[in-house]
Image (tube, rainbow, N blue to C red):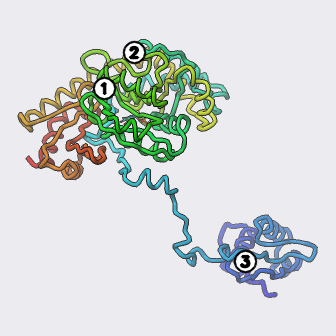
Amino acid sequence: MELDWLLAPPLPEAVPRQQVLYRRLREAVLTGRLPSGTRLPASRGLAATLGIARNTVLFAYEQLVAEGCLIADRQGTRVAELPAAARASPRAVPALHVPQVLSARASAAVRREPAGDDEALPFSPGVPDFGAFPFRAWRACLERAWRDAGWRQLGYAAHGGDPSLRAALAAHLGSARGLAVDAAQILITSGTQAALDLCARLLADHRDTVWVENPGYLAARVAFGLAGLQVHDVAVDAEGLAAGADDWQRQRPRLIMVTPSHQYPTGRVMSLPRRFALIERARAAGAWIIEDDYDSEFRRGGPAPPALFGLQADAPVVHAGTFSKTLYPGLRLGYLVLPRPIAADFIHAAALATRAGQGIEQRALADFIERGHYTTHMRRMRARYSSRQAALRAALQQAFGPGLALSGGEAGLHLVMWLPDELDDTGVAARAAQLGLGVRALSAYTRPPVRCNGLVLGYGNLDEGAVEGAVARLKRAVGG
Ligand SMILES: Cc1ncc(COP(=O)(O)O)c(C=O)c1O
């Protein structure tokens, strides 16, 4: 058999002969140039034909035998029987045979959601003031964490998270949020998103119903949809989640996701009677409430309303918090506070499900909290965000006059500006985007039959000096 072509020029530079021989043989098998059953010469014979060492041939043969392209037995070496698909060149595979990239469940969960642009533009919601981040103090904590690190910190994080961070958080939540919790109830997560994902997978079964607020947090819908849950939208009113008898009877929930301290995105605060009623009804329905407490740290005019968690003994509530707003989103650290009866099982399952990491960052964060940097930073940011909001309100008032309707300023980093019906918020947001603004349309967070028409204006990363210019651009986008 003529096999000179196996090492015929041109030979690629800097590629060892054995690799060239292996690749060419493999290609010949896959393209059918060497059909199934073809007997190849003995290694010594081929080595002589090609003028190379026998070992070079042996390497290529052994590699291809290991891959299943060749078969070696007592009779020698021959080309294996390969399925037609392995022989077809990639271009020859008909498009229909390419498997769908995402599962049907994943496609359905992400289909309607825009891939959020993570750029921090003026008015982009949810972005903290990056310029005010205490780099020096944080760097010192990170350096200390690395200096003290042993090999343990290089492995997966401890179950539940770094013990010092869990303890520091328990103390912090006691003093700042009035939550009487101990470290064993705290699970450190990679932000709220991972916490929601865990709740969906550990507290509900496939196709169980999860309630989300309408309008509500889009990323939560995605997490629940991806976990195979049925997402049911429940309207919100001025007092928060407004579930009707129909919702309770026909859409019995297993999970109820709420943002009671500062409804996202409308900014409303859930009233105390609504909180008690929700806990009562959830208890009766055998549902878990997920309390997403994403920005109550930046509460204006007094302390945040009491969390649902701890409002009543043994309430079926898990409480999620994040460092995305108080520090920075790229840190990817958040936490779940779990009721005592489920904490150990939940944390055990979470450890198996996620194999958490970031041990060093967790240590640094514990140090950051223990040294008082966290409280100081938040105090500073609370004042800063308050004056930013005041500046924004004043500029909006000046630009849009007495018809201006704002809501959601009690906490957090964004305001909602309601638009009259004749102005379509999607169109305004698109025009604003062309002017370099990160404004979001309120309707994007809404599902029918609920209708909302307005703009979500993030001001966390909007310098006071830039407010007027940004509002002038917004006015152009609105068409004034
Ligand atoms: C309602 C809501 N919850 C939670 C978060 C924080 O999510 P994560 O901790 O995954 O960054 C955000 C951030 O934008 C949010 O808007």
Under circle 1, the secondary element is loop
Q: Which residue is mark 3?
A: 29
Of the numbered discs 1 and 2, the one sitting upstream in the chain is 2
What residue appears at the point 26 percent right and 44 percent down from the top-left corner? 450
Helix, strand or loop at mark 2: helix
Give the crowd class for mark 2: few <14, some 14-19, many >=20 residues within 10 Å. few
Q: Is residue 95 left or right of residue 110?
A: right
Q: Are circles 2 and 3 on residues that touch, CB within 8 Å?
A: no
Mark 1 neighbour density, 10 Å: few (under 14) some (14–19) many (20 or more): many
- The local secondary structure at tag 3 comes to helix
| Residue under the point 54% across and 76% down | 94
Say whether disc 1 or disc 3 marks the residue closer to the N-terminus: 3
Of the pair 143 and 288, the residue shown nearer to us: 288
Between 43 and 221, the residue placed more toward the observer is: 221
Residue at far left of view: 402
Q: Between 245 and 131, which is closer to the camera in this rendering?
A: 245
Badge 2 is on which residue? 176
The x, y position of residue 429, in whole percent, is: 22, 48
Residue 244 position, x and y percent, is 32, 35
Residue 261, by quadrant, is top left
Residue 54 appears anywhere in the view = yes
The response on whether ligand 1 sits within 8 Å of label 2 is no
Residue type at numbered disc 1: Met
Q: Quadrant of the N terminus?
A: bottom right
Q: Is residue 378 left or right of residue 84?
A: left
Residue type (three-letter) at the residue carrying disc 2: Ala
Amino acid on which disc 3 is placed: Val
Q: Which residue is mark 1?
A: 270
Which of the marked residues, 2 or 3, is nearer the chain's N terminus? 3
C-alpha span from label 1 to label 2: 19 Å
Residue at (89, 76) in percent of width and height: 76
What separation in Å lies between label 2 and label 3 (alpha carbons)?
69 Å
